[in-house]
Amino acid sequence: MERKTVVLIVASEGYQPIEYNETKKVLEEGGMCVRTASDKSGMAVASDKTTTMVDLTINNIIPDRYDGIFFIGGPGAMDHLDNPTSYKLIKQMVKAGKLLGAICVTPRILAKADVLTGKHATGWDGDNELEGVFKKYGVIREPKDVVVDGNIVTATCPASAQSFGEAILKLLQEK
C-alpha cells in the first residue's frame, strides 16, 4: 500500500498548536506523511509562540499530489487563511475528490469557499457567530465535536484535535 500524504495548513502567525500537533501526531502514527503549509514560507508562529517549519506555501499546493488538506484553527487563521487563495485551493481539492477538513474557526473558511452548502459540519462558536455564517452559506450545523460528511471532516476546538485526526485517518485508510 502506498503511503498517503496530507497537508496541514496553519496561519503564519497565530495557529493553534494543540490542534496542529495532536492532528499531526495521530496522522503520522497512522503511517501518513504530513506536510505543513502556510500563507508564508519559513517558520509559522503558534499562538503560544512555539514554531513549526513550513514545507510549502498555500499557493504552491498542487492538489493531485496530496490525498487531503486540513486547515488548523487559532486566532490568526481568519487573518491569514480566509482569502481567495485558500478558496481556490479548497474548490480544487473538492473537484479532485480529495479529502478536506477544518478545525476550530476554519470551517468558516470552507463555508465561505462554498463547499459546505447542504453539508453537515461543526466548528468553534466562542464568538456566537458560527450559526450566522453557516446559515448564510447553507451549512447544516451539528452540535458535535467532530462531524464527517462525505470527504469533509470538521471539528470544534483543541479538545477535539485527537478525534479530528482519528476521523481523518479513518477516511484516508478507507480510500
Image (tube, grey):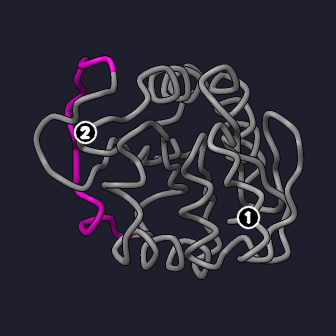
Provide residue 77's location: percent of width, then percent of height.
40, 48
Which residue occupies 81% across, 50% down? Answer: 148
Provide residue 3's location: percent of width, then percent of height.
51, 41
Res. 43 image quadrant: top left
Query: Which mark, residue 7?
Result: none
Which residue occupies 37% across, 58% down? Answer: 81
Label 2: which residue?
Answer: 13
Q: Looking at the picture, tell me which residue is in the foreground, 113 or 150.
A: 113
- From which residue to which does the magenta span run? 48-62
Q: Label 2 neighbourhood size at 10 Å, few (<14), some (14-19), many (20+)?
A: many
Which residue occupies 22% across, 52% down? Answer: 56
Front label number (1 vs 2): 1
Res. 115 image quadrant: bottom right
Q: Amino acid at mark 2?
A: Glu
Label 1: which residue?
Answer: 132
Q: Amino acid at mark 1?
A: Gly
Residue 60 included in the magenta stretch of the image = yes
Which residue occupies 50% across, 25% down? Answer: 28
Q: CA distance from mark 1 to mark 2?
A: 26 Å
Answer with left or right where residue 65 lies relative to residue 169: left
Q: Looking at the picture, tell me which residue is in the foreground, 70 or 139.
A: 139
Residue 137 included in the magenta stretch of the image = no
